[in-house]
Image: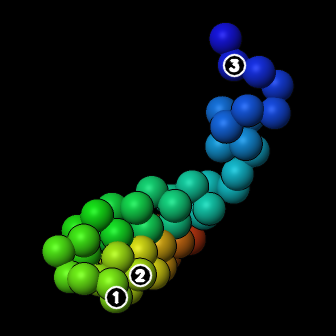
Amino acid sequence: MSEPGGIKDYWNGLSPEARRAAQWGAVGALIAIPVPFVGPIIGGVVGGGLGYAKAKGKI
């Protein structure tokens, strides 16, 4: 069982836009890992933006 205030409660309290941005940001960062230093940061930002745009219905 999860404790109150755990990660599951935190995740369930997020807005759909924040969830999608977090998921796509993680995917973007994983894809960009082969590029040293800057790749994961840029990949995370691009992925997060893509997830946010998808959640808002703009894509």
Location of mark 1 (residue):
38
| Vertical relation: 20 (above or below) 47 | above
Location of mark 2 (residue):
41
**Neighbour tally class for label 3: few under 14, some 14-19, many 20 plus, Cα within 10 Å:** few
- Disc 2 versus disc 3: distance between alpha carbons? 31 Å
Residue under the image location 73 percent in, 32 percent down: 6
- Disc 2 versus disc 1: distance between alpha carbons? 5 Å
**Amino acid beneath label 3:** Ser
Residue under the image location 43 percent in, 67 percent down: 25
- Disc 1 versus disc 3: distance between alpha carbons? 36 Å
Assign a secondary structure to mark 2: helix
Location of mark 3 (residue):
2
**Neighbour tally class for label 1: few under 14, some 14-19, many 20 plus, Cα within 10 Å:** few
* Residue 16 place in picture, x, y as percent: 61, 55
**Neighbour tally class for label 2: few under 14, some 14-19, many 20 plus, Cα within 10 Å:** some
State if disc 1 and disc 2 touch (CB < 8 Å).
Answer: yes
Q: Quadrant of the C terminus?
A: bottom left
Furthest-right residue in this view: 4
Residue under the image location 69 percent in, 19 percent down: 2
* Residue 22 place in picture, x, y as percent: 52, 61
Furthest-left residue in this view: 34
Residue 7: name its quadrant.
Answer: top right
